[in-house]
Each structure stands twice: as structure tokens, then as C-alpha cells.
Amino acid sequence: MTMVKAFPSEFIANASTDLQSGVLRWGLWGRLGWQDILMRYRRSVLGPFWLTLSTAIMVAAMGTLYSVLFQLPAADYIPFLALGLIIWGFINSILSEGCNTFIEAESVLKQIAMPKSIFVCRVVWRAFLLMVHSLPIYLVLLVWFQIQIGWSVLLAFPALLLLLGHALWISLLFGMISARFRDFPQIVASIVQIAFFLTPIVWKPELLRGRMLIVEANPLYHVIEILRGPLLGTPPEALSWIVVCTMLIAGWVLTFWAFARFRPRIVYWV
Amino acid sequence: MADPVPQAASEAIVEPTTVIGLDDVSVTFEIYGSGSRSIKRRFLRSVLGRSSAGDDADAKTVAALRNITVDIKHGDRIALIGKNGSGKTTLLRVLAGVYEPVSGTVTRNGEVSALFDLTLGMNPEATGYENIHTRALYLGLSPQEIEEREADIVAFSELGESLARPIRTYSTGMLLRLAFAISTCVQPEVLLLDEWISVGDALFLAKAEERLNQLVDRSSVLVLASHSPDLLRRFCTKGILLNEGRLMHFGPIDDVLADYTGWILI
């Protein structure tokens, strides 16, 4: 193994080796992510299902109140709200915990040489596992409100893959920026809070009556919609797929460049 | 690195192969002040096009290693000698591949294993068994290799049924025994040690010393950083003297130690 200074081609090769070998160490990141969840909820009876319960309560309470406020049928609104909150929960953990990707791995990064991408996979896997714990809520609503889903529900699988693809680049990029600039996580946190209200999660896009630009210009709407739509039996529009795929490519190009350029510095930063 | 040019017949001495080669390696750290660690300030500075007083002084670089060129060969037992802050730990981390040098090249032919922090990656809430598995995965062992070594680790640590408890309930001695047993379960080709490891109670100490000696004996290269001349003389044949990140002397251990002692007395 040879490392040469400031040879961009070498840096690029090193970055892709890192990504490949990191993903292949799934035994390690799978275990670390799973252990993180166990640790977080170790002393509670319900374990990670606490999150399921709190989401369920939030859906029930907000669903009943807001369906009245917005004058929307509960059968329509509550599943919409539930899925929005569940998917948002995933996006939220990626945006906020993604900032800590490398910071939380400091002690290990400084002790042994290993692919940095292992820690990216760990963050995404952990957030994914947490989201899966909310699956029962969806299943209950599916039966309760007898939501009509057709074959288009299968679109949820490619949508989920796209979502994970986004989660990976964001955790990697935000992890690097936060390792270098320690005020970045706070900036992200305040933007995330605003984004929650600007994105159709609690409110439905139809309520805007025509002023759709505010929705369609919001990338987070499309990211949520490609997964929420199929699960509610309303396949998302082509525009959403196009936006999500384009952003995925753009995000990865930017992130890969940054990773190739700054990967050797990460250990110095943390 | 290119293969060495075949020597002329008159110089038919077989040179030991290079296991780790450093060529003109430098490492600099940026010492970040609060200002340079803020993306808001960085942004404002580039937008406003001027820097407020103190901003520039924030980011300082410190040279931790300067132009180190060294060939570590098969069979070498090397002592790293130098005052605190002379770059010993940084050099060990470069050898381990943790720090990629800012300039220069590092060549490695062999598995390098560092025993810096025995409790690496151990989770206080997880049980002893769980920690054995996690650490083994950090070391890159396959599930099969983990199985093979688990019995040995369990036996060596003498922890018995305690291994089923979370390690936060362990005493310091128990924790060290487990950490030591896990850390030494793999025989590395290149062994890097930052200070000689001391473990637990007197009874275990003898056993641990024996195991560590074995590990050292069987490794093809040892690099040991320490402040104890006796220890270094016992295990090392060569020495590297560092001062302020510069390589001052690389040679037989006694010469380097003499150089160092003469030099700190001044």
C-alpha cells in the first residue's frame, strides 16, 4: 500500500477503495448500529418500541385534532400524517446524527486504520432500523382505514433504496463538514426545524389551493413523497422521481469529490 | 516503491526486506482556535472580504514530524526515544496507518497491529462476550476466526461467568484482563507499542508479561515507544531518537540511548 502526496488520481482511488471495503465490512457496522440502538434503550422496558409508541400517540392526537382543523376526512389525513412523521423521523436522524458520523468515532479512528465509510454505514443502518420499528403503525392504519393499495405499493422498494442512497451521502458529507467545523451541527439543527414546518408532513399539499411552487421547489417534499405515495396507494408523480434521482447523483458527485480530497484529513480533524 | 536494483556480485550480502518504509514523511497539525472551527465565521469572512483581528491567528500549524526517512526491516526491534511532544506517538500512528502523512510516502509490506489503547471500541453496556465479538470485528476477523479465538480469550482472561455481565460492572483489573486478552489474540507481523503495557494484579501480570513477550518474539518487527531505558534495552536492538519531529539519530540502541542521555543533560 503506497500513499503519495497530492496525487489526485491516487486520492480518488483511495476514496473508492475506502467506500468499497467499508460497505463490505457489514458485519462490523451492522453490529455497531444495532448495538447503538440497544444501548440507547437498554434501561427501558419497551426498548426501541418506545419510539413506536410515542409516534403512535402523536399520530392519534395530532391526527384527530388536525383532521378537524383542516376539515379533512380522518381516513385520508391520519395515514398521510403517520407516514410523513415516520419518514421525517428517518430524515431527521440522518441530518442530525449524520453530523456526528466521525466525531462519535473519534477514539477508534485515532487507534486503528480502517475504512472511514464503515461509520457512515453505521449511522444510516441505525436510522433505518429505528424507522423499521414504526412499521407496525403503518400496518395497523392499513387495516384500520382499509387503505386501497395496488401493485404500485412495490414502488416503495426503489423509493427506499433512493432514500438510503441519499442518507449515505448526507451522513458522509455532513460528517466531514462537522468534524472540521464544529458549529455546523447547530446550523443543521435550526434548518431542520424550519424545514419540518415548510414540508407537507402535517399539512397536505392540496390545502395550498394552486400555489404548488412552495411544495414542488422543496426537495424534501419529493424525497418523502416517493415513499409515502406508494404506501398510501397514490403513486408519486414523475417529477418527484426525477428530482430525487437528480439530487442523488449531484449529491454523490459532490460528496465523492469532497471525500477524495479530504479523506486523509478526517482523522486530524476529529 | 520500485524494487531495488540487483546488486553486483561482489556485494552478495542478502539485505533484509523493508517492512515499513517512510520516505520524507511530514505531518503537520492545524491547531484550531474557536474562530477557524466556525463555518459561520469562515463564511462571513469570505463574504465580507476582510478578516477581523485575531481570525488569522486562529489557525496555526504545528509540525509534528518533519521529513522523516526511515527503513524498518524484517527483524528490527526499534525503540522510539524522545521527550514528551517529540513526535513519538505521531510516528507510531503514521506507522499504523492512522495518520496519512501530509507529504512523503509510506510503504508497508505486512500486517501492522497497534496496541495503543487496549479498551479500543469496548462498550461498557455490552457484556464481555459481546465485546469480544465487537473487537474481533474491528480487527477484521471473520466469524470463523472469532469462534476459534473465543475459547482462548475466555480462558486467558480467567473471567468465567462474569463474561455474561455488562463490562461496566467489572472492576478495573477485570476490565484490563479482558481487554488484554482480546487485544493480544492476534499475532501481528508488525507490533507497535506506545509504552509497555502493564496489566492487573500480580498473578495475572506474570501471565500477561509472558504472553506479551511471546507476541514480541514472534512478530517480525517491533516498534516500542517508552521512557524507560532498561525496558528499551531489554527488547530493542535499534533506536530512533526524535526531537521536535525531526529524526536525530537512527542506530544501535546503546548509541542512541547514550546520545539521548548526553543530550538531555545539556
Image (cartoon, coloured by chain):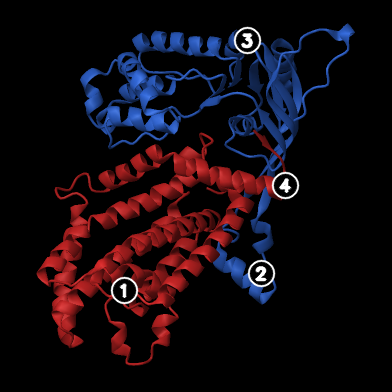
* Alpha carbons under labels 3 and 1: distance apart: 74 Å
| Location of mark 2 (residue) | B52
Quadrant that contains the C terminus of chain B: top right
Return the disc, 1 or 4, that comes first in the chain's sequence: 4
Q: Is residue A44 left or right of residue A123?
A: left
Comparing labels 3 and 4, the label whose residue is closer to the camera: 4
Kindly identify the amino acid type of the residue bearing the numbered disc 3: Arg
**Whether labels 2 and 4 share one chain:** no
Q: In front: A162, or A22?
A: A162
* Alpha carbons under labels 3 and 2: distance apart: 54 Å
Kindly identify the amino acid type of the residue bearing the numbered disc 1: Pro
The picture places residue A23, in percent across and down from the top left corner, at 46, 44
Chain under callout 2: B
Which residue is at a point 45% across and 81% down the rendered structure image? A217
Comparing labels 3 and 1, the label whose residue is closer to the camera: 1
Query: Quick check: can you spot residue B101?
Result: yes
Q: Colour of chain B?
A: blue
Kindly identify the amino acid type of the residue bearing the numbered disc 2: Ser
| Location of mark 1 (residue) | A235
Q: Are marks 1 and 4 in contact (CB under 8 Å)?
A: no
Element type where label 2 sits in the image: loop
